[in-house]
């Protein structure tokens, strides 16, 4: 009888040890899964915070640059300001009409280059948003670089776009920013090498006025792509004026010509 009790006790001890081992393993695994889930949640929260920081840092200047460029293109193709002021009797007015048109393009390319340098891609928190954002940037760049669109005025290949963007970058306190308009004008006057990159674009401004609606299709396509980019970055229309109409696909009748926008 004593032997049976001893055997049963030993068996129960072994079984208890097995059960305890299984429970310990299960508990450890559950804790590990819990810790992994917490780590993943913290990572996603951190990623979301980083995305918000990135957005707040780059969205506003990119939005403003895109808006200023689309506004200038809208006015250049569909308005009367450029045609009038490129031939103004006042030299300062003529220069502003020409130089600022080139500046807003260079300013936009600068912010695109800053984003490309600092972030490689703008992490908006999910792959779909990243993909859509990059597609919008690509469409704007392609409108300016395409060989399929008529005319050569304001055509810039991708390497030229990046080069102009790089030339416009100014760094202070470890942060990249875009050159201001006064600094841009000063560099045009003071540096032949700097002006060399913009000489053709400065001449191209007059070509916009010389071309008809069809001849300015490149600028029309770029303006459409910029509006799409702006709508993506500011869908609620809270950060920029609600003045973001796309140029018509064809020239409007004289009585329906678009009014000048911000100059």
Image (tube, grey):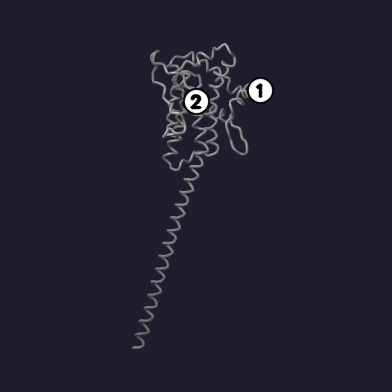
Q: Is residue 13 above or below residue 34?
A: below
Residue found at x 47% / y 33%: 239
Q: Quadrant of residue 177?
A: top right
Mark drawn on residue 30: none
256 vs 141, nearest the viewer? 256
Percent of width and height locating residue 240: 46, 31
Which residue is under mark 1?
190
Seen in the picture, residue 250 relative to 111 is either above or below; the reply is above
Question: Between 233 and 93, which is closer to the camera in this rendering?
Answer: 93
Q: Which residue is more in the foreground, 179 or 235?
A: 235
Which tag is nearer the camera, tag 1 or tag 2?
A: 2
- Residue 145 visible at all: no
Disc 2 on helix, strand or loop? helix
- Quarter the N terminus occupies: bottom left
- Residue 5 visible? The answer is yes
Disc 1 element: helix
Which residue is label 2 attached to? Answer: 69
Residue at x-position 48% and y-position 46%: 47
Q: Cα distance, mark 1 to mark 2?
A: 25 Å
Q: Quadrant of residue 117?
A: top right
């Amino acid at each position: 009888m004593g032997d049976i009790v001893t055997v049963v006790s030993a068996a129960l001890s072994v079984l208890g040890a097995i059960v305890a081992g299984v429970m310990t393993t299960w508990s450890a695994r559950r804790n590990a899964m819990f810790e992994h889930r917490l780590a993943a949640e913290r990572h996603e929260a951190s990623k979301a915070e980083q995305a918000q920081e990135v957005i707040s840092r780059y969205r506003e200047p990119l939005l403003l640059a895109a808006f200023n460029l689309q506004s200038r293109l809208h006015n250049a193709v569909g308005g009367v300001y450029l045609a009038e002021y490129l031939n103004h009797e006042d030299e300062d007015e003529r220069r502003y009409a020409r130089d600022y048109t080139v500046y807003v393009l260079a300013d936009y390319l600068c912010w695109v280059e800053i984003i490309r340098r600092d972030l490689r891609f703008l992490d908006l928190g999910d792959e779909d948003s990243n993909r859509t954002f990059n597609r919008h940037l690509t469409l704007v760049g392609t409108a300016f670089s395409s060989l399929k669109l008529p005319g050569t005025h304001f055509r810039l290949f991708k390497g030229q776009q990046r080069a102009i963007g790089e030339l416009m970058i100014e760094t202070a306190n470890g942060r990249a920013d875009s050159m201001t308009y006064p600094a841009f004008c000063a560099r045009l006057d003071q540096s032949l090498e700097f002006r060399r990159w913009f000489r053709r674009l400065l001449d191209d401004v007059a070509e916009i006025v010389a071309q008809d609606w069809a001849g300015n299709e490149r600028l029309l396509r770029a303006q459409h792509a910029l509006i799409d980019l702006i709508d993506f970055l500011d869908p609620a229309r809270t950060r920029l004026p609600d003045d973001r109409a796309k140029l018509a696909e064809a020239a409007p009748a004289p009585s329906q010509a678009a009014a000048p926008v911000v100059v």
